[in-house]
Image: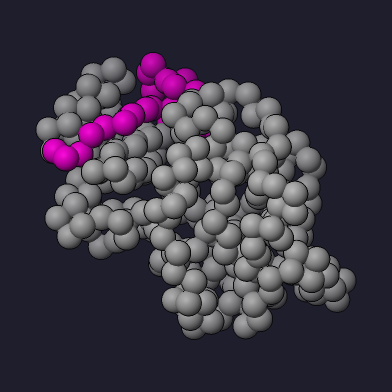
Amino acid sequence: MEVVRSFLLMQEIVNSLKNQGSKIGFVPTMGALHQGHLTLLQQSLKDNDFSVVSIFVNPTQFNNPEDLIKYPRTIDTDLEKLKDAGCDYVFLPSVEEMYPNEPISETWNFGNLEAVMEGKNRPGHFQGVATVVRLLFDAVPANNAYFGMKDYQQLLIIKEMVRQLALEIQIVPVPIVREADGLAMSSRNMRLTAEERQLAPFIYQTLKQAVALAKQLSVEELKQVVKEQINHKPPMVLEYFEMADGNDLQPVKTLENHQSVRAFIVVDLNGVRLIDNISII
């Protein structure tokens, strides 16, 4: 496994491998790797001749500076995990390497995709995500890039960015990877205390119950049930629960006339934001 810190060298390596006829897979991460990330890598290793994982904590996507400071950084452990998993290249740039002038987000127009949920609650977040992913795709011009469905809105934003720029890279969604008790794997889980970690799986239990109740209750009734359940489990506080079309993320008032509907949830657990989603239809 080779660790590359230079933007231009990484680009050169990938282009050289592609010119030799190799297929390249790419997994962008912010480090603090867990089995969810390794599942993305495993899919890439299966689909491609060479796989690249990037580790870069991107400052432009944190609308809360406190979140950026608290984001877990476990680089030595991450590199060990990637080596053991069979990764070929790790792209490990500095902030200066990615943003030679200063870390500023480009301006993107994602329309209604960005006007809801995470886009609405975290202004500027997806502008930062799109900016860094475009830069990463420049540094690692792979054939396939792998993203987890836990960050479903992010996945659709990146697909839209690729469409707008007509990039020749295939975005491959990978299903949510969960702990044995159902909690969606996330680097943020490291910040939970033992007591909070025991409570956190209730989020997924609530989502599963929402699936079961979706055919019996109206969307508004279901939202009310979820709100009451989460808020009756202090210190959990519901930030939002939304039922949205799986293709354009616009809120739905009824399940009728939709081919795909997903339930999206964000819960604050003593300052740790936990997100999850599930298919309703």
Highlighted range, magenta? 234-261
Query: Which percent across, then down, holds residue 88?
Result: 64, 78
User: Is 242 included in the stretch rendered in magenta?
Assistant: yes
Residue 71 in which image quadrant: bottom left
In the picture provided, is 199 more to the left or to the right than 21? left
Q: Is residue 52 visible?
A: no
User: Is 9 included in the stretch rendered in magenta?
Assistant: no
In the picture provided, is 194 more to the left or to the right than 105? left
What's the residue at 45%, 64% (across, down)? 73
Which quadrant: the C terminus?
A: top left
- Above or below, 198 relative to 106: below
In the picture provided, is 112 more to the left or to the right than 237? right
What's the residue at 61%, 64% (across, down)? 54
Q: Is the magenta region chiefly helix, strand or loop?
A: loop
- Above or below, 108 relative to 23: above
Residue 94 in which image quadrant: bottom right
Residue that lies at the very extreme toward the front in this rendered image: 101
Residue 195 in which image quadrant: bottom left
What's the residue at 50%, 37% (across, down)? 63
- Above or below, 42 relative to 69: below
